[in-house]
Amino acid sequence: MRPFKYTEASDAAVATRAVAANPEASFLAGGTNLVDLMREYIAKPNELVDIKPLAMSQIRPTSSGISIGALARNTDTANHPLVRKDLPLLTMAILAGASPQIRNMATNGGNLMQRTRCQYFYDITMPCNKREKGSGCGALEGLNRMHAIFGHSKDCVATYPGDMANALYALDAVVKVRGVDGKERSIAINDFHRLPGTTPDIDNSLAHGELITSIEVPKNKFAERSYYLKVRDRASYAFALVAVAAALEMDGDRIKHARVVLGGVAHKPWRSAEAEKALAGKPANRAAFEAAAEAALAGAKPLSHNGYKVDLAKRSIVVALERAMGVTAND
Ligand SMILES: Cc1cc2nc3c(=O)[nH]c(=O)nc-3n(C[C@H](O)[C@H](O)[C@H](O)COP(=O)(O)OP(=O)(O)OC[C@H]3O[C@@H](n4cnc5c(N)ncnc54)[C@H](O)[C@@H]3O)c2cc1C
Ligand code: SF4
């Protein structure tokens, strides 16, 4: 590991100024992703500004919904009574991720910022445009069974690996950020992560030194009918092959609004406008769910080793929507 300077942030202004002033500095939160990347020589900061002392871990109701602190731990967020009651989709998504030990350390801000799990990104002997710009993409013609089927480019076919964000996309969350100039700005969650294009080294829309302070989730009517389905190689402690965050608001026996967000299929959580449009106004039955799944996957572009994700995602969408409506595996 490269030697680094370590400081504990006394307040947000000092933290943002310190990181902004040094292009090789990083914020440190729970450290569950950053420290691993440092050990593997993938991240090489020469300065860590530990933000854990900052007062950014509150979870509280607001006039428009729920405010979730960037430093609240994943475990505390998933189990908070407000989140369990009003945002069960978020609870399910967080609890589908990592392990209890990691969730006890991991923070919400760090979770949004976590980097891809592409194996070529982690292997410094292999080419990877995300790790080293212009070096090539090992996965494009290599082992890409875990990789993207939507939104990829010839420069990067990696997926965003997180679970929590998939639920936040379905719930129209907004990420509050403190800029280097001390001004706050809000980023709609859908604009937070980015597609790789020709700059896969850039994961999201934060400028260097900008600090996530909270995640705001507006009031919604999805609490009663939502479900997070994660399909993976092992029952726990594994990243998604495909995940689905599904939520439905009903008007009588018809679907008024739907949310369908796919995880494990793109460089960012993939909200399917096609599936949501196909569901609007329809009765909540298997035929409608299957039509929505077909619409969602119509534009998929699988790679050499991940064609299986197309059918897996279709079936997962149907199951997630059925479970959102209370249909269980035994029904
Ligand atoms: C073995 C393993 C399995 C895992 N499985 C899953 C899984 O199945 N699903 C899943 O979703 N996740 C999974 N994770 C990832 C885990 O959820 C993340 O590592 C964690 O959420 C990161 O949070 P952290 O606080 O530890 O971030 P850190 O590691 O401290 O930081 C990560 C990055 O975020 C930046 N950062 C942190 N906080 C802020 C902030 N407030 N503002 C701006 N930048 C910030 C840091 O500078 C750093 O670049 C797994 C991790 C491990 C190690
Ligand atoms: S898919 Fe992206 S992260 Fe993986 S090797 Fe290619 S450029 Fe690197």
Image (cartoon, rainbow, N blue to C red):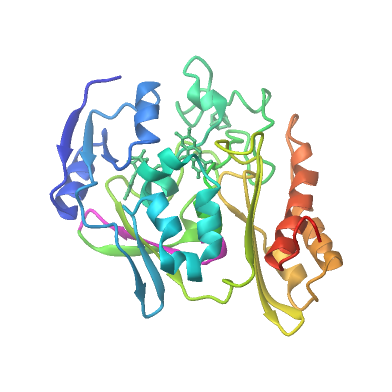
Is residue 136 shown to the viewer in this render? no
Vertical order, 125 against 138 (above or below): above
Residue at image location 70% in from the left, 58% down from the top: 320
Is residue 171 shown to the viewer in this render? yes
Residue at image location 43% in from the left, 46% down from the top: 111
Residue closest to the eye, 9 or 187: 9
Q: Is residue 226 magenta?
A: no
Residue at image location 67% in from the left, 64% down from the top: 273
Vertical order, 148 against 283 (above or below): above
16 to the left or right of 258: left
Q: Quadrant of residue 256?
A: bottom right
| Percent of width and height locating residue 76 | 38, 55
Quadrant for the N terminus, please: top left
Residue at image location 48% in from the left, 76% down from the top: 219
Residue positioned most to the right: 287
319 to the left or right of 14: right
Quadrant for the C terminus, please: bottom right
99 to the left or right of 31: right
| Percent of width and height locating residue 5 | 17, 29
Residue closest to the eye, 185 or 34: 34
Residue positioned most to the bottom: 252
* Magenta-colored span: 168-181
62 to the left or right of 161: left
Ligand 2 visible in quadrant: top right
| Percent of width and height locating residue 163 | 54, 49
Q: Quadrant of residue 102?
A: top left
